[in-house]
Structures are given as C-alpha cells and as structure tokens.
Image: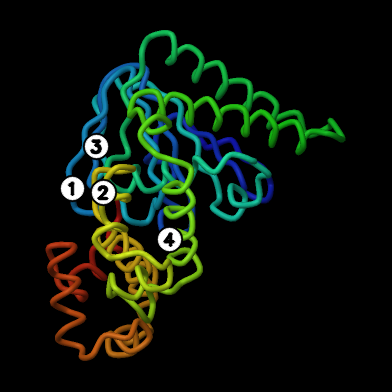
Amino acid sequence: MQPLQEKNESIIFADSIKTLSPIQHRDYVVHVLCLNGAMSFLFHETHFNIVATDYLIIPTFRLARAFAQSSDFKGIVMALEDRFVSGLTLKSNYGVFGHLSLLNNPVMQLSPQKVLRCQQDLIRIRERLLEGDNPFNRELVEHLLMAHILDLYSIHAEKNNYLEAISGRNAELVNRFVRLLMQGDFRKNRNLDYYADKLFVSSHYLSEVCRKVSGKGASYFIERFTIQEISKLLYDQSRPLSRIAEELNFSSLSYFSRFVKQQLGMTPSEFRKSLHKSR
C-alpha cells in the first residue's frame, strides 16, 4: 500500500514502516502504533522490539535501520517532517523531556484504553488529511495532531512520574540545555563543562538533573546530538571524512573515527556504506 500524504509531505501515513524508505535520510519523526504482531529495528545501534499495544516514536528516523516485521504485523505508521513538528504552537515544554527520553528508549507500552485513544486520534488525523477540499483543513489537521501529541505527553509523563520528579527550576535548566544542543553548540563544544558553565551550574548537577528526566546523564545527549549530525553529514558521499571531522571540531580524523566507532560500532566509512544500503 502506498503512503497517504499531503502534497508537501509534512505528514505521511502508511501501514508499514518499510514504505517510508524514500524519506529514510530526511528529517522526520516517525510514530508507530502496533496493533498486532511484532516489529524489530536498530536505533543508535541498540536493538528494540515492539509488539501489540506498544507505541513507538523514533525522533531521528535517519538513525534507525534494520527494520523487520512479522507476517501478521498490523499497525498505523505516521511520519512527521521535523520542521512541521517544530512549527506547531504547543504551549507545553514537556516535549523537551520526551525528546531526551526517546533518544534513550523510543518505545512506550500502553494500556488497552490508551491504545484505543491513540488509534482513534491517528485515524481521525488521517481522515482529515484526505479532506483536501476543506479550506480549513491544514488548521484542523494541525490541531488534531497537537491534541494527539498532548495525549502522548500525558501517557509518557504518567508512566515515568516526570511531572512529580522535576521541579520548575530543573525543568527550565533542561530546557536551556536542550536549546543549546538544538542550536548546534555541540558542533564545536562536546565538553560537559562548557554547557555547565553556560548554564551557571556544576557539571555534576547538570548530569544529575538530566538523569532524573531521562535516566541518562548530560554527556549522553551531547553525544546523541553529535552522532545524529554525523549521520546526516555522512549521507553526503561527496563530503570527505576529513571535512566532516573539521566541521565538527574533532582534533584529528583518527579521533573522529574512534568516536564514531565507539558510538555506532563501525567506522565512518562502514557506517556511510550502511546508510546507502536498501533498508
């Protein structure tokens, strides 16, 4: 089955993640609600499985690979262009916590009631997406999507007790840390002390707050953002490895290679080849 999509490809629906291969190396966030069967994949070179009642959110689709699904797999797949998601006017800052947590573990287990709610949300978004003759269609789709995202925030926060565990001060600290990463500071600065100094806290305190939010320290997320950017640059085969190392402020090509090998389990050249294999 061919994906259903808007003309601008901001939102793409499909019955199988394998039909999304044309956008594998573009900036998309992918949601999968598994209704039956099972699916497996690698994300940040960690193996994950999902089964019925699992909701998967891959925040960086380009870093996921080796997808396989059972013959009886049934689910709803939704791909959202990163720029489109960033443009939604959500007032909640919870997405920052969710993003950090999903980089660590992109799978949520849902109760039967939550599965039904998410299924209804996704079906309604898809139905509205196809009503192109409605002059208010884009706004309707955006608001339905925002309602669904808020549902996911609620499910995620409830399961992880984040709202109770994180004070307002710490929430703001994490927000500021993530903003530094999102604006690209990691391209030149991967030392934890740099971020701690910018945020006027100790490196230990910054790491502990991140650990409360996601289970991982601050350095983990600096590395995640870095390897995400590396994978994007490696996809361009015309770009020499030495140039990528220089752009990301690695002191030498050998250090760059060691970093990639440590993070992804393969050399930059090997990973570049894997990016261009059919998924």
> Which residue is disc 2 drawn over?
43
The amino acid at mark 1 is Thr
Instruction: Give how far apart the Cα atoms at labels 2 and 1 are.
Output: 5 Å
Q: Earlier in the sequence, mark 1 or mark 4?
A: 1
**Please, what secondary structure does the residue beneath circle 4 have?**
helix
The amino acid at mark 2 is Phe
The front one of 164 and 79 is 164
Query: Residue at point 37% right, 41% down?
Result: 18
> Which residue is disc 3 drawn over?
68
Q: What x and y, as percent, mark residue 87? A: 65, 51
Query: Residue at point 14% right, 70% down?
Result: 261
Does residue 59 lie above or below 57 as drawn? below
- On screen, residue 169 versus residue 104, left or right, reads right
The front one of 212 and 156 is 212
Q: How is the image coloured?
A: rainbow
Q: Earlier in the sequence, mark 2 or mark 3?
A: 2
Q: Quarter of the image holding residue 108?
A: top left
- On screen, residue 76 versus residue 81, left or right, reads left
**Please, what secondary structure does the residue beneath circle 1 have?**
strand
Q: Earlier in the sequence, mark 3 or mark 1?
A: 1
Image depth: mark 4 or mark 2 in front? 4
Instruction: Give how far apart the Cα atoms at labels 3 and 4 are.
Output: 35 Å
> Which residue is disc 1 drawn over?
46
Instruction: Give how far apart the Cα atoms at labels 3 and 1 are.
Output: 14 Å
**Please, what secondary structure does the residue beneath circle 3 have?**
strand
Q: Earlier in the sequence, mark 3 or mark 4?
A: 3
